[in-house]
Image (cartoon, rainbow, N blue to C red):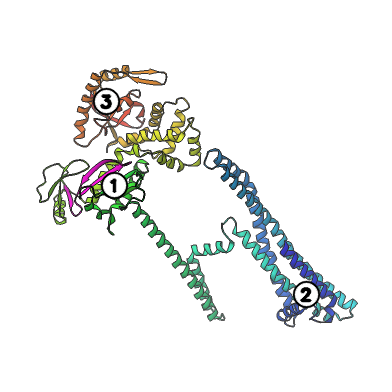
């Protein structure tokens, strides 16, 4: 508005000079207007009129009309979207995702955005009015000047038209150029839209994202320069400038990508590299401790152990939906030189002994190995193995033996350690991270669970599922099942059973064999009756009453059936009634933790069962 008023005030002042002093000559309105008049008009005021008309068309029809329309649409869309954005802010605050201060800040940003688009709508009207006013003032100057020159000053019609038209065109050009600049600036600001940052930054950012566009523009300019009659040198210079700018932008983007990749690699290596404790009191969730002879597996320039561990984390995320914590690798002079150990929350869980410069050979059929090498036990499963040199390893592999490098021995062991302790590693922080990764609607559903600490309840359910190696990838369905169950009960056991029922398709798919059947071990009718009588249901409480002798007999019979398949690495599920499932699982947890225990209610309707054994039958 201020810019428009200043320009119009100058326009009014120059109009007064032209009309009052124009009869004295072309220098009546000042040297600036005279200079523009002589340069553009060049002795022929028709040329000046044409040039002035072109500038008016560019300013009024092209720039001003377009920016006005954009400002109108942006203002309308901004106002229409304001209630929805306001409700989203209130919903986030109600769900506990943001605090009151953050909500207040977002509301202020929303108000500023709405005020900006409204102001730009009004400003575009000022700019458009400025262009119209300049055109009207020019017409007044021409007509009024000719009348004043002929009627009052006694000039001839031709002389008056030449003088006053030349001065008016010069004045119009002087005023239209800043008006054109103001319109262009307003158009740039309006068309920038919601892009963050200043307008010049937005333009440069868009150009830097598409350097190929500059190359295409350079090719087009060079092609135009080859056309007959066009200045080849000028267009070649412009094309070269475009190529140079595109190359600089492309190189800058390539350097940024390399630096980012290097930073990511350094972060990943730092995540799994032996290091001294900056804080000796720090308790890592998961730690790999290496003896002095194994440190090179992690800190050599070509070390593959960190990348293998990173791949393992991705595997757990995809298969179980479980965020495996970062593995901090440390060296420990107190460990035997070729020994490694895993620690969970500072407590050693497992250890093994390997040879960093050799390969492990295992016979998958379990027969003795007749090769030259150092006898050993495979740390994870306790199989007989040999440590051999690289050449012998190649021979062993050609004979059908399994050959494993030392890094794979460690990661295989780590895999089983994590699987056995997923429930313990599902800390409150891990559960909260999973919840925060949900869509907002499901985050709201979690916060609406009728318990004092919904996140802790979700953590408990996830721990129970992971304890039985049930994937938690479908966290939204788990949350829905929890909310559904908690409308009727607050018992964690009943909530868990409802979650498992909702996950029946996933559970059965994980237990099915290669032929699409789920192999199960069932209970004999006698055991079914005894378990039904042993489970005492009082309201929502369930108690299990069975003599220790009968419990021991059941465990022995179950172990006999399970061992028939365990020797072939087969683990059929034990199917029991829903009421007894939890108690049967607790009985078998110590003697056969790998055996899945499912209830009849967890069998999906489209799944076919295959009974492979019966306990007590």
Q: Which of pointers 1 and 2 lies earlier in the amino acid sequence? A: 2
The image quarter in which residue 514 lies: top left
Q: Which residues are magenta?
A: 338-361
Camera sees residue 98:
yes
User: Crowding at label 2, few (<14), some or many (≥20) Cα neighbours within 10 Å?
Assistant: many
Magenta-colored stretch includes residue 350:
yes
1 vs 3, front mark? 1
Q: Quadrant of the C terminus?
A: top left
Q: Residue placed at 60% from the left, 43% from the top?
A: 84
Q: Note whether 267 is above or below 486 in the view shown.
A: below
Quarter the N terminus occupies = bottom right
| Disc 1 to disc 3, C-alpha distance | 41 Å
Q: Horizontal placement of 217 versus 57: left or right?
A: left
The quarter of the displayed image where residue 155 is located: bottom right
Marks 1 and 2 sit apart, C-alpha to C-alpha, by 86 Å
Magenta segment main secondary structure: strand
Horizontal relation, residue 586 to residue 399: left or right: right
Label 1 belongs to which residue?
288
Which of the two labelled residues, at mark 3 and mark 2, occupies the earlier sequence position? 2
Quickly name the residue at label 3: 522
- Helix, strand or loop at mark 2: helix
**Circle 3 crowding by C-alpha within 10 Å: few under 14, some 14–19, many from 20:** many
Q: Residues within 10 Å of mark 1 (few under 14, many from 20)?
A: many
Q: Is residue 332 above or below residue 212?
A: above
Q: Determine which quarter of the picture holds residue 322.
A: top left
- Return the mark for residue 168: 2
When the figure is inspected, residue 531 is found, relative to residue 76, above or below; the finding is above
């Amino acid at each position: 508005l201020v810019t428009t008023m200043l320009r119009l005030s100058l326009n009014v002042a120059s109009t007064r000079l032209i009309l009052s002093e124009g009869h004295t000559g072309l220098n009546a309105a000042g040297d600036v207007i005279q200079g523009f008049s002589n340069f553009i008009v060049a002795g022929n005021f028709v040329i000046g009129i044409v040039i002035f008309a072109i500038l008016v068309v560019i300013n009024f029809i092209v720039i001003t009309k377009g920016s006005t329309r954009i400002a109108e649409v942006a203002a309308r869309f901004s106002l229409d979207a304001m209630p929805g954005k306001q409700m989203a802010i209130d919903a986030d605050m109600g769900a506990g995702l943001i605090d009151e201060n953050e909500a207040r800040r977002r509301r202020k940003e929303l108000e500023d955005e709405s005020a900006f688009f409204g102001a730009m709508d009004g400003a575009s009207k000022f700019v458009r009015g400025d262009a119209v006013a300049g055109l009207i003032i020019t017409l007044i100057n021409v007509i009024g000047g000719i009348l004043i020159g002929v009627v009052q000053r006694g000039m001839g019609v031709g002389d008056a038209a030449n003088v006053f038209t030349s001065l008016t065109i010069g004045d119009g050009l002087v005023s239209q150029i800043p008006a054109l600049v103001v319109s262009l600036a307003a158009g740039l600001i309006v068309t920038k839209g919601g892009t963050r940052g200043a307008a010049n930054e937005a333009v440069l950012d868009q150009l830097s994202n598409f350097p190929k566009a500059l190359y295409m523009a350079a090719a087009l300019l060079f092609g135009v320069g080859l056309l007959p009659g066009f200045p080849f040198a000028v267009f070649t210079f412009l094309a070269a400038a475009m190529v140079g700018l595109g190359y600089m932008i492309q190189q800058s983007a390539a350097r940024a990508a390399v630096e980012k990749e290097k930073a990511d690699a350094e972060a990943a290596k730092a995540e799994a590299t032996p290091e001294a404790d900056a804080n000796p009191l720090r308790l890592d969730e998961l730690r790999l401790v290496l003896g002095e002879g194994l440190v090179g597996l992690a800190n050599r320039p070509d070390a593959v152990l960190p990348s293998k561990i990173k791949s393992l984390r991705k595997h757990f995320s995809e298969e179980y939906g479980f965020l495996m914590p970062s593995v901090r690798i440390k060296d420990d002079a107190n460990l035997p030189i070729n020994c490694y150990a895993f620690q969970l929350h500072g407590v050693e869980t497992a250890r093994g002994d390997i040879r960093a410069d050799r390969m492990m050979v295992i016979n998958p059929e379990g027969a003795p190995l007749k090769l030259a090498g150092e006898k050993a036990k495979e740390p994870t499963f306790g199989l007989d193995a040999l440590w051999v040199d690289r050449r012998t390893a190649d021979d062993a592999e050609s004979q059908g033996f399994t050959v494993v490098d030392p890094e794979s021995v460690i990661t295989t062991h780590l895999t089983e350690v994590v699987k056995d302790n997923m429930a313990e590693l599902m800390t409150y922080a891990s559960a909260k991270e999973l919840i925060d990764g949900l869509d907002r609607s499901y985050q709201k559903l979690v916060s609406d669970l009728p318990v004092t600490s919904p996140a802790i309840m979700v953590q408990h359910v996830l721990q129970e599922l992971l304890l039985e190696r049930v994937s938690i990838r479908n966290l939204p369905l788990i949350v829905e099942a929890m909310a559904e169950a908690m409308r009727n009960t607050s018992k964690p056991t009943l909530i868990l059973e409802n979650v498992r029922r909702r996950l029946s398709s996933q559970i059965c798919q994980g237990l099915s064999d290669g032929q699409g059947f789920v192999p199960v071990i069932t209970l004999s009718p006698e055991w079914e009756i005894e378990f039904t009588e042993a489970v005492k249901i009082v309201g929502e409480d369930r108690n299990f009453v069975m003599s220790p002798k009968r419990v021991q007999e059941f465990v022995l019979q179950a172990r006999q059936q399970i061992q028939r398949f365990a020797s072939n690495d087969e683990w059929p599920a034990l199917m029991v009634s829903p009421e007894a499932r939890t108690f049967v699982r607790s009985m078998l947890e110590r003697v056969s933790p790998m055996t899945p225990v499912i209830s009849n209610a967890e069998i999906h309707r489209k799944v076919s069962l295959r009974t492979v054994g019966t306990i007590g039958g």
